[in-house]
Image (cartoon, rainbow, N blue to C red):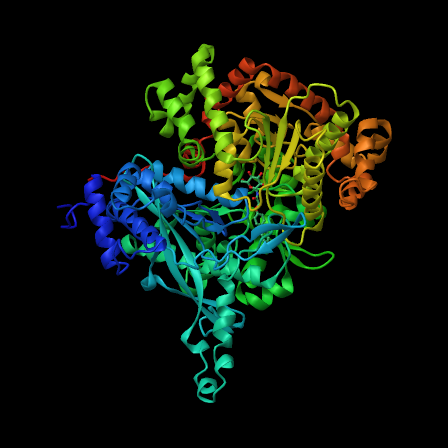
């Protein structure tokens, strides 16, 4: 019996089989003979989950006993990926579960196929949150992730006549076996209303709407440890008073639930934008809902073991994933000053010490600001607090830089012109003890450009923490055959939790048999993916569609190749499969035009027998963590071609390099660090660097037409689009490039085309290519999220592990 007085769950296939039968019977109310595949799936999930639940209970007990310093990760988005496979691996049941299912006559692949990915995020920022949770658990760091349980996740992408159409992602339609409801920890959230001062001069917020926050959590197990942390997600509910009994009694049934439905809209849907701020009130409401519920929960947990507010920052660090949860700063001030009665100065000192902020962008249009009038209507007390924070802050700036009004205007949390808005990034910098960018270049540019004034004022506040990825999900689970080969080559699987050990592969580059096996694995992964010729160069660009990422540059290369093949059909071209995958924000028309044009070019090439043996463009719809995990292991070439200075870090670049793809890329984000590590010989570099791009863009003299006129191949590619050669679509794309070309695509065209020729030459030398591929894997250990979390722990969080023992 274990510490809870329970019979421990078995570790053999026979015991697992018994537990499947028992769960099928008692938790689904059925038997193997009459079970549907859905019954079998839910039962398998519960049987796996049970094996983690015991670790979870022990983790909670160990954490309670230690009363440690906690990391609370606040994020509006999580892209956790499918849970079943991961939880089988982490609970050590992957093998026995499959044996047991076969024993019961169930098809494991069919049953596992019903597992659904929770798509509660847009892209890089949401997936990073999931990778950091994975690494924190693996490193035994006491942590809780807080987020929103959206009813509808990121939309499902389909193509109709080559154009993106969006469908709702009702991810819990069949239920969600991974979720633990926690109704006892429900919270109450206020909105609207007004403020009043009571007789003691204390401020009270009288709300105009009250909404309930209903928590549930999912398990976040560590790999190779007993730690199981949680991610707690909040769902909005109408409060009891929002049900209008008098209306119901009067027969107005729909009207009676109006208010409750309205409240529940808060967690209805994830906003599918990943860079432009729309300024919608419901989005602000979502942000405050997350913040209010999570802070109350954090304080509840603090109080289980502590009484003194002075201890709060010693026991708590709250990491803000971008500005989305920045309302937590004025909210903690409100709780401390209005509800707890602390003086402003003490409350402010505690607040600042508690928070840290990660910035994920440099794009000015991605910096969140909220109209003051909207902010004031929804959160009247928070606006007063923000004003007070701002006044005291500006006094400090005035002290340091007397007479510098322009600086005051730039640094103010309130933007005055052309309309009054609250600048969330300024609030986040002012209210935290540490600010970090997500790659070396990005952190440097933040301090020199976007947040320059703040770095002048507080130079030591600014940090870099280069992003990382979970080696468990992005190589062990995604690429099982390569993982086995690596384990065979290194003689142990310890590399999975200590990714620097991959350097041991370097010496195997000299082993012809190993290289042969390496190639065979890559080929088998292409066969598994099932798109395009497995012997062709598989050229992969997988990421959200955005003009700064420059999918259009890749497309211009494809058109150029197409035209070269058409012009000289006799030559021997190395077959290439170019794979795109990614979603565009539904309202981002320029990005959608690029998608439409890619699909048109793919169709034209497919229909042309002179070209199709050499060139194929594929665009599987609905890119998500699951599809990524299938594509990444099959890639030979990784396209990381953003305009230098625009991509904060990128993490797909790391996943692809780790899986042995060679990168063609600019000196942007983490590409620079990848190239530094894998070596310039194993990386295809092209394009303007950041200073050159800034000079060209802001020098004011950039004329995309000049590049068009000077470069015959470029002109011919754009003319083909303008002449309607690709089903008549995509003129908007060409016109935008010839008009403003915001992201200097035409300026980088020639350099990119020439670099792609180098790729083609390198591909022809199979053995050398394989060596480079192995070296990419061998030298990518730095990009483990375990290293990222260690960096946060040492430089920002100042937390240490808590061991969970038997
Ligand atoms: C904003 C307003 C309204 C609705 C949604 C948003 C929003 C949502 C997500 C804005 C930005 C969002 O994410 C940005 C993002 O994913 N940034 C990426 O972060 C990665 C992890 O740090 C980096 O690797 C990428 O370079 C960066 O683009």
Front one among 104 and 131: 104
| Residue in the picture at 44% in, 61% down | 235
The part of the image, by quadrant, that contains residue 723 is: top right
Extreme bottom residue here?
A: 250
The part of the image, by quadrant, that contains residue 66 is: top left
Q: Is residue 312 visible?
A: yes
Q: Is residue 466 visible?
A: no
| Residue in the picture at 68% in, 33% down | 554
Residue 763 at x, y percent in the picture: 60, 19
Question: In the figure, is residue 632 to the left or right of 178?
Answer: right
Quadrant of the drawing holding the C terminus: top left
Question: In the figure, is residue 663 to the left or right of 559?
Answer: left
| Residue in the picture at 51% in, 49% down | 121
Residue 565 at x, y percent in the picture: 74, 26
**Number of numbered markers:** 0
Q: In this picture, is 393 found above or below 256? A: above
Point out the quarter of the image occupied by ligand 1: top right
| Residue in the picture at 71% in, 59% down | 419
Question: In the figure, is residue 203 to the left or right of 587?
Answer: left
Residue 175 at x, y percent in the picture: 39, 58
Extreme front residue here?
A: 609
Question: In the figure, is residue 11 to the left or right of 482?
Answer: left
Front one among 215 and 29: 29
Residue 157 at x, y percent in the picture: 58, 50
């Amino acid at each position: 019996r274990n510490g809870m007085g329970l019979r421990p769950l078995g570790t053999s296939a026979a015991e697992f089989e018994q537990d499947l039968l028992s769960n099928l019977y008692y938790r689904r109310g059925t038997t193997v003979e009459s079970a549907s595949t859905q019954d079998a799936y839910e039962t398998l999930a519960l049987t796996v989950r049970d094996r983690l639940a015991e670790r979870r209970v022990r983790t909670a007990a160990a954490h309670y006993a230690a009363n440690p310093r906690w990391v609370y990760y606040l994020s509006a988005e999580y892209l956790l990926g499918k849970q079943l496979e991961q939880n089988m691996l982490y609970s050590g049941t992957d093998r026995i579960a499959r044996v047991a299912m076969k024993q019961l006559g169930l098809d494991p692949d069919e049953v596992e196929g019903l597992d659904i990915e929770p798509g509660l995020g847009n892209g890089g920022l949401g997936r990073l949150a999931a990778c950091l949770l994975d690494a924190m658990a693996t490193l035994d760091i006491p942590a809780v992730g807080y987020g929103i349980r959206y009813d509808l996740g990121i939309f499902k992408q389909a193509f109709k006549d080559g154009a993106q159409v969006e469908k709702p992602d009702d991810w819990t339609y069949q239920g969600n076996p991974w979720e633990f409801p926690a109704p006892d920890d429900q919270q109450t959230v206020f909105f609207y209303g007004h403020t009043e001062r009571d007789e003691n001069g204390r401020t009270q917020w009288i709300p105009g709407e009250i909404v309930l926050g209903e928590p549930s959590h999912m398990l976040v197990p560590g790999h190779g440890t007993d730690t199981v942390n949680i991610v707690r997600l909040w769902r909005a509910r109408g409060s009891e008073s929002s049900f209008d009994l008098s209306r119901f009694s009067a027969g107005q049934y729909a009207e009676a639930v109006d208010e409750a439905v309205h409240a529940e809209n808060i967690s209805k849907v994830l906003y599918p934008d990943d860079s432009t701020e729309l300024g919608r009130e419901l989005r602000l409401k979502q942000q405050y809902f997350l913040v209010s519920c999570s802070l109350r929960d954090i304080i509840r947990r603090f109080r289980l073991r502590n009484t003194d507010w002075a201890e709060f920052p010693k026991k708590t660090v709250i990491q803000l994933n971008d500005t989305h949860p920045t309302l937590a700063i004025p909210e903690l001030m409100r709780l401390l000053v209005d509800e707890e009665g602390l003086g402003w100065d003490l409350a402010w000192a505690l607040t600042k010490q508690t928070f840290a902020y990660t910035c994920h962008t440099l794009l000015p249009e991605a910096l969140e600001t909220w109209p003051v009038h909207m902010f004031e209507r929804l959160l009247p007390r928070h606006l007063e607090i923000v004003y007070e924070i701002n006044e005291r802050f500006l006094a400090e700036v005035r002290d340091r830089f007397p007479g510098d009004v322009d600086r005051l205007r730039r640094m103010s949390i309130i933007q005055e012109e052309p309309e009054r808005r609250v600048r969330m990034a300024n609030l986040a910098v002012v209210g935290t003890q540490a600010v970090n960018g997500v790659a070396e270049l990005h952190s440097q540019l933040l301090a020199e450009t976007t947040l320059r004034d703040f770095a002048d004022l507080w130079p030591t506040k600014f940090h870099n923490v280069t992003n990382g990825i979970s080696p468990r999900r992005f190589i062990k689970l995604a690429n099982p055959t390569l993982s086995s080969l690596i384990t065979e080559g290194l003689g142990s699987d310890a590399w999975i939790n200590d990714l620097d050990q991959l350097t041991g592969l370097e010496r195997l580059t000299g082993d012809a048999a190993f290289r042969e096996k390496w190639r065979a694995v890559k080929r088998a992964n292409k066969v598994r993916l099932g798109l395009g010729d497995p012997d062709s160069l598989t050229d992969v660009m997988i990421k959200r569609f955005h003009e700064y990422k420059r999918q259009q540059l890749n497309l211009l290369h494809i058109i150029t190749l197409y035209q070269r093949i058409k012009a000289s059909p006799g030559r021997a071209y190395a077959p290439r499969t170019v794979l795109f995958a990614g979603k565009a924000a539904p309202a981002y028309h320029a990005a959608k035009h690029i998608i439409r044009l890619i699909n048109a070019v793919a169709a034209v090439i497919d229909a042309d027998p002179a070209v199709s043996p050499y060139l194929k463009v594929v665009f599987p719809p609905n890119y998500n963590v699951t599809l990524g995990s299938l594509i990444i292991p099959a890639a030979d070439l990784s396209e990381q071609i953003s305009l230098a200075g625009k991509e904060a870090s990128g993490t797909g670049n790391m996943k692809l390099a780790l899986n042995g793809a060679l990168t063609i890329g600019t000196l942007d984000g983490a590409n620079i660090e990848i190239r530094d590590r894998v070596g310039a010989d194993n990386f295809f570099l092209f394009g303007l660097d950041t200073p050159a791009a800034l000079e060209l863009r802001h020098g004011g003299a950039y004329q995309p037409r000049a590049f068009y006129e000077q470069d015959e191949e470029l002109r011919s590619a754009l003319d083909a689009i303008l002449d309607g050669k690709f089903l008549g679509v995509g003129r908007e794309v060409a016109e935008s490039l010839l008009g403003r070309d915001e992201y200097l695509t035409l300026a980088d065209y020639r350099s990119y085309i020439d670099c792609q020729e180098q790729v083609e030459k390198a591909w022809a030398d199979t053995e050398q290519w394989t060596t480079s591929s192995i070296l990419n894997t061998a030298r990518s250990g730095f990009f483990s999220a375990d290293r990222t979390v260690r960096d946060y722990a040492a430089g920002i969080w100042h937390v240490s592990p808590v061991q969970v023992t038997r």
